[in-house]
Amino acid sequence: MKKHIRKLMLAVAIFLGISSVSAATININLSDGTKKTYEIKESEYDKTIYDFKKSIEEDVGIDADHQVLRIIPDNFQENDNTGFKDMLAYKDDDVLNYNLFKREELEGDTLTFYSIPPIANDNDTAYAILEGALGDYYNGYEAWSIECNETITKCKIRLSSNSQIYKEMNIKYVYNEEMAKSVDKLVEKVKNAGKVENADRYRFIVEDLELVNYWVNGGSMINYSDAYKKSLDYKNFYLDIRAGDEQPLYDVMFGIGLYKFDNTIYGAIGDIGSESYHVLYVPSDLENEKILSYLQERIDSYLGKDKMIISEFDNTNSNIRIEFVDENHKNMSSDGKIYVATINNKKHYFIVNKNTSKMQTPKLITSDFLTDVTVTSNSGSIPLDTMIEIKKLTSGEEYDKIMKILNATNSETFDISLFSKSINKYITKLSDGSFEVRIPIKEELKDKSLVVYYITDDGKSEEYEVKVENNYAIFNTNHFSVYTLAEKKTQVEIDESESIKNPKTSDEIVIDLCIGIISLLGVGLTIKVLKK
């Protein structure tokens, strides 16, 4: 499928006659972190990728036949026969970016794939799994037009650089069967929710403020669709799907969907994606002359002021012409106008539809597949592709330190974090809201009075109030770190814990002893006086 997409993009670009540039820059990232930059002159545009590989052999220390070039960000493995003229035909600029790897020879007669086995006679899924497993673990090899036996346990492996057959190999699949069953249920839910009628593909809509969030942050669009994430029970499986078409008023992105856990493929969909018709919604009874001001207020309320500027687009005074996608799309526009959303000088175009029921303020919901710990937030500052990452602590230096401070015997400790691939960073703190955290209550903590603890850098414990709902312990915070869910202590237990953590020094013991002796002497003297 990836090769089909590449060929389609090249064909469209060449058909449209998109002009090439006079010189091209090629940026190469080596696997050891070294960065290289090369210039390709216009006179060299007829050369192929293989010619380029030959020219940099000495500089990168890898012979041309063992160089693997992966395009950034699509991660396609570049074909040796592709010419630079073709490559630059669909580029908006004169820069090509690649990651460069060394192809290792395949030893023996067996390949180990960390994946479920493909389903026989399901070509799309089989290709998705084989391509994913090969691409993840064996740079320089591909599953395109791969020839396998019926059970897909013996295949002829091809070189990604030229699609030539390399050798026939046995395939060994390594995976956890129970995990596979759980993921398969989720994948089936996704398929049922996104099935396109009379087609073997699956699509999900990105609309309204979901689209706005995507425009601000970018990345893989399907991860912004609540309809898609809901069908997946909001579990933290990220799909990196970027192939497709981006038009002024319509986007579609599609590709192979691989569902991985612990670097193992547990589910696959051969053709899954998302689309958007660039529609923002306003109340059904809003007057036309108030649309622009209402939209700006709505965007400001969601993103924050001045993050996105809304204006009307004037086709008559623009050097580009923007048309509705089709007649149905035109009819969706309540005022017949096209609008512009400007973010950091980049423009996005959209139409407006009056439909109160379609207005939505996106909520980030992300749930860990293994632990079922779930985080929710209404903040528009968080990219909607953000996903939870959980480490359950049961041992180690940090865990021991926490247990010593808390002296908790009935507890669970989690290192909770959120990561957004679109902006490539962790979301550690919120300044404009809070996160709701839901932790499933284990059997030993059920029907107990619960509390959540956070240990500060100076070793002090902070308590978070817990609400119990449907066997989940729920608390709110504005930052992420390590949290411990525990049974709340009684005052006696707290006092005992404090005495254990803060035992008296020898000086304090001497002082207490002296005070005790003096007290006894005082009592004896009093008794003696009374007898007299």
Image (cartoon, rainbow, N blue to C red):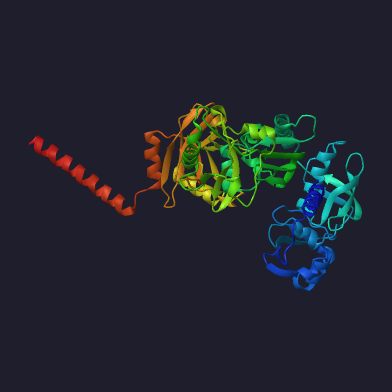
Q: Residue furthest front?
A: 316
Left or right: 407, with 116 as reference point: left
| Observer-nearest of 56 and 416 | 56
Residue 80 visible in the displayed image: yes
Q: Quadrant of the N terminus?
A: top right
User: x, y (%) of residue 397?
Assistant: 54, 52
Left or right: 419, with 75 as reference point: left
User: x, y (%) of residue 138?
Assistant: 80, 54
Residue 385 visible in the displayed image: no
Left or right: 387, with 517 as reference point: right
Q: State which quadrant residue 329 falls in.
A: top right
Left or right: 103, with 443 as reference point: right
Q: Residue at x 82, y 69 (%)?
A: 54
| Observer-nearest of 343 and 28 | 343
User: x, y (%) of residue 497?
Assistant: 41, 41
Label tally: 0
Q: Quadrant of the C terminus?
A: top left
| Observer-nearest of 13 and 195 | 13
User: x, y (%) of residue 233?
Assistant: 64, 33
| Observer-nearest of 112 and 246 | 246
Q: Residue furthest left?
A: 532
Is residue 98 placed above or below 458 in the rendered structure? below
Q: Residue furthest bottom?
A: 58
Is residue 292 placed above or below 401 in the rendered structure? above
